[in-house]
Image (spheres, grey):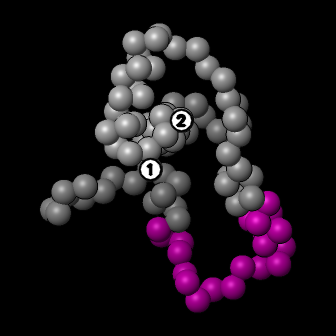
Amino acid sequence: MKPNEVAILDSEEKYIEDNIDFNKAIPASEKSALMASLREASVRKPVTLRMEGADLEAIKRLAEQEGMPYQTLIGSLVDINDVRKVIPRGR
């Protein structure tokens, strides 16, 4: 983001920003659900996908330039493009 650029938040991010309070304890009734959600969110799962050979070679070249494994680059591209905005939650 550029220095004078304003971030546009989605509704979930806006809710979090509006309701954040660092000094507020999490109620015990919500804590276990929150912890389970955090554990699930941090689990990376292996996938297999098919793609054009030329696309894979281009990704491998870019990954080498960036100094990272190509699988990490693919994962980063998925994160950057935020699949949550394309695929609604619960699907």
User: Height in image: 44 above or below 13?
Assistant: above
Based on the picture, tell me whether residue 27 belongs to the magenta stretch: yes
Left or right of 64? Residue 75 is right
Farthest residue, direction bottom: 23
Q: CA distance from mark 2 to mark 1?
A: 28 Å
Q: Which mark is residue 71?
A: 2
Single out the mark in the foreground, 2 or 1: 2
| Residue 24 image-quadrant placement | bottom right
Q: Tell me: 54 left or right of 11.
A: left
Q: Give the residue at mark 1.
A: 10
| Viewer-nearest residue: 36 or 85 | 36
Q: Position of residue 1 (x, y in %)?
A: 25, 55
Q: Amino acid at mark 2?
A: Gln
Q: Secondary structure at mark 2?
A: helix
Looking at the image, tell me whether mark 2 or mark 1 is earlier in sequence order. 1
Residue 60, x across and y down, in percent = 42, 28
* Horizontal side, residue 49 vs residue 18: left or right: right
CB within 8 Å, label 2 to label 1: no
The magenta segment: 17-36
**Of helix, strand and loop, which one carries label 1?**
loop
* Residue 73 in sight in this render: yes
